[in-house]
Amino acid sequence: MSPVEMNLEARFEAYVADEKKIEPKDWMPDAYRKTLIRQISQHAHSEIVGMLPEGNWITRAPSLKRKSILLAKVQDEAGHGLYLYSACETLGVSRDELLDDLHSGKAKYSSIFNYPTLNWADMGAIGWLVDGAAIMNQVPLCKCSYGPYARAMVRVCKEESFHQRQGFQIMLTMAQGTADQRAMAQDALNRWWWPSLMMFGPSDAESPHSAQSMKWNIKRFSNDELRQKFVDMTVPQAELLGLTIPDPDLRWNEERGHHDFGPIDWTEFQEVVQGNGPCNKERLAARRSAHERGAWVREAAAAYAEKQAQRKTSSTEPHAA
Amino acid sequence: MTAEQHFQVALRLGDDAMILGQRLAEWCGHGPVLEEDIAMSNIALDLLGQARGYYSRAGALEGLGRDEDQLAFFRTDQEYRNHLLVERPNGHFGDTMVRQFLFDAFSLERTQFLANQTVDEDMAAVAAKAVKEVRYHFSHSSQWMLRLGDGTEESHRKVQQSLDDLWPYAGEFFVADDIDEAASLAGLLPDLSHVAHAWHARVSEVLIQATLQKPTTTWSQRGGKHGIHSEHLGFLLAEMQVLPRTYPDAAW
């Protein structure tokens, strides 16, 4: 590293430490740029892959009101994907390149979306637990050091908190409903609980990127801190629903002022990350297929835009409104 | 117009919006580009909102206490009154956009009239909101006719095929029966021969710009308005209705 770069890097570190925002045209270390591209694109991919498990129930939503809410929610996720890809593009990478990395399997997305949605209460559990865990992870990002990401997250978090409330509302309706509905709600909680806890990522000691991201003000709290906060918030909500969290070791620890909970099966987590979850192949195949089947449409739109641009420049007539 | 005919008018309007909205919702997460996923979901949401408005009105007119969900989830395919076009499977994106374009051009005429009539003010209120949406839908589907028709050779060929395939289903819009005639006489719905005229003009203008050939066939498939549907509607409804029919006592 040259003295000039060292100087830049030191100034950058001081700037970030001072809680100032980095903007696209500012100088930034390569590693910072790469970390952000990795994280924001993973986040964007998670939004669009995340449309699939819930999309699975749109056509079967049990009332017109629920169908509208679910469709609007999944549409919000597409919107989040869009802001996040745009935020990522400010770092000098194109959406096409990012999508290629998703389709080739090079880029990751949140493993939670590799689990199947098997009954209607899953729409409740995803909103309540998965979006709830996502909010825990994402609220601190609204203050992250990279300006475009922080600003995108402000909007994302507002919508996510609405999603979480609607999810809880589905759970409440199901939990207070018929015996069949209660059974569906419990079944959904049983299947989504542990994967939701895994969403916070490996324990701090095992988390490869945590320390550097903390230093750069991209990350504010450790994985374990956020997971604990999520458990503490969710336990009373499950009690309110009258549902049982599937963890025999779960209990309030007076001394710590937190809930203790059982060990997480990190082998399962690693297997799902490696591609062996119940739906990894289907999710990726669905994304690839949508992209491939849409190629001729994107080409047509580009060709038409090109023709229009040529017509505009070659025309001597004033353009009619 | 009898009370039964008035009810049927509301039901037909609701069913067109319901079935097309359900079809578009099938695209969610599978669109050719993220922006179109958002647009198609948006249009589906508008249609779903329109269906709910028309169904609520239909339920009130019928007076048997059926609400929007009972009308949507507890009728068989033979009790559905939508036009055949809207139940056509999504096919590829060009098929979906042609279906949408042909329907939007029709719906725009019908909805504008409905918004301005004074026979049924509740339906006028639903239509007044819908007309703004349908204008956007028509503009969106027209744009895609241009892009696909005047895009690449492949897209031109594909979308011309979609147009040829779907055209025979559009004719049903204009085949008036006693319900259409009574509603038109009462001033609730427009005269379908006027709608046909406006529709042809609207559609032709876009097709010319899109360098697409207007199909010459004059034969039209029909039956939807009387409950004689294609083989596709039964599957659509089986999927859509499965939960309320499996758990009829549940509230969701």
Image: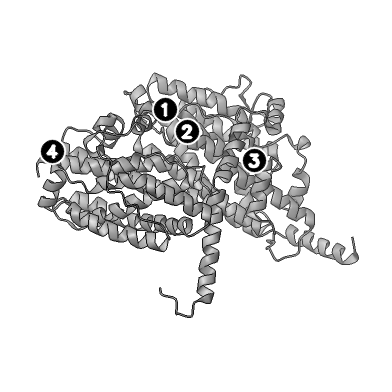
Mark 3 — residue? A109
Q: Amino acid at mark 3?
A: Tyr
Do tags 3 and 1 sit on the same chain?
A: yes
Q: Is residue A196 visible to us here?
A: no
Q: Amino acid at mark 4?
A: Glu
The residue depicted at 42 percent of the width and 47 percent of the height is: B162
* Quadrant where the N terminus of chain A is found in the figure: bottom right
Label 1 crowd bin: few (<14), some (14–19), many (20+), radius 10 Å: many
| Chain of the residue displaying label 3 | A
B128 sits to left or right of B231: left
Q: Amino acid at mark 2?
A: Gly
Q: Nearer the viewer, residue A107 or B96?
A: B96
Question: Distance from label 3 to label 4 (Cα)?
Answer: 54 Å
Do tags 3 and 4 sit on the same chain?
A: no
Q: Are marks 1 and 2 in contact (CB under 8 Å)?
A: yes
Disc on the earlier residue, 3 or 1: 3
Question: Distance from label 1 to label 2 (Cα)?
Answer: 9 Å
Question: Distance from label 4 to label 1 (Cα)?
Answer: 37 Å
Circle 2 SS class: helix
Mark 2 — residue? A124
Mark 1 — residue? A174
Vertical order, A50 against A247 (above or below): below
The residue depicted at 53 percent of the width and 40 percent of the height is: A51
Q: Nearer the viewer, residue B229 or B41?
A: B229
**Can you give x and y, in whole percent of width and height, for residue B134 in the image?**
33, 54
| Chain of the residue displaying label 1 | A
B111 sits to left or right of A289: left
Q: Amino acid at mark 1?
A: Met
